[in-house]
Amino acid sequence: MDLRGVSDDGLFAPRLMAQSLRTTVDEIAQTAGLGRDALTRANRVGNPRTQKRLREMVEIVNRVAPRFGSDLLAYAWYRSAPLAGFGEATAMQLVRDGHADWVHLYLDRLDAGIPA
């Protein structure tokens, strides 16, 4: 996902993210574990917590996109594929629970050829 294409004035723009991923702002909010108002009210989009969640999501989707060949498939993986070693938790669920670092460690292990 081209970061310049999903940001506006230095902030992640939910509307642009939704367009890039062919979804809705409501789904982006759900995926990031944020309330709809956090992404639709201009005064809340710039909130550090909101921007952190959006950044974590974009970083992981960008990191796995080359594996899947597209941002859309990477986004689908992010939302729905359970990660080995984390029960039935998906990358989305781990990020929503504040564990984006665990997802990066999981991907580091895969990149190093260590079975998950």
Image (tube, rainbow, N blue to C red):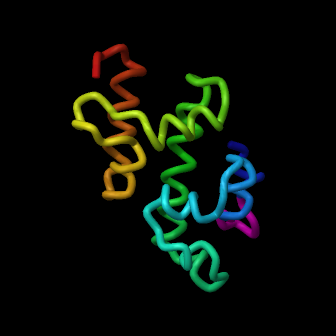
Give the left or right position of residue 47, taking residue 100 as reference: right
Give the left or right position of residue 16, taking residue 49 as reference: right
Q: Residue at left 65%, top 36%?
A: 71
Q: Residue at left 54%, top 35%?
A: 63
Q: In which quarter of the image is the C terminus?
A: top left
Q: Residue at left 49%, top 63%?
A: 52
Q: Give the range drawn in magenta.
A: 7-13
Give the quarter of the image for residue 28: bottom right
Residue 92: image location, x then y, percent: 42, 48
Give the left or right position of residue 1, taking residue 88 as reference: right
Give the quarter of the image for residue 103: top left
Residue 111 on the magenta segment: no
Residue 39: image location, x then y, percent: 60, 72
Residue 44: image location, x then y, percent: 57, 81
- Residue at the bottom extreme, as displayed: 43
Residue 12 on the magenta segment: yes
| Above or below: residue 13 compared with residue 3 | below
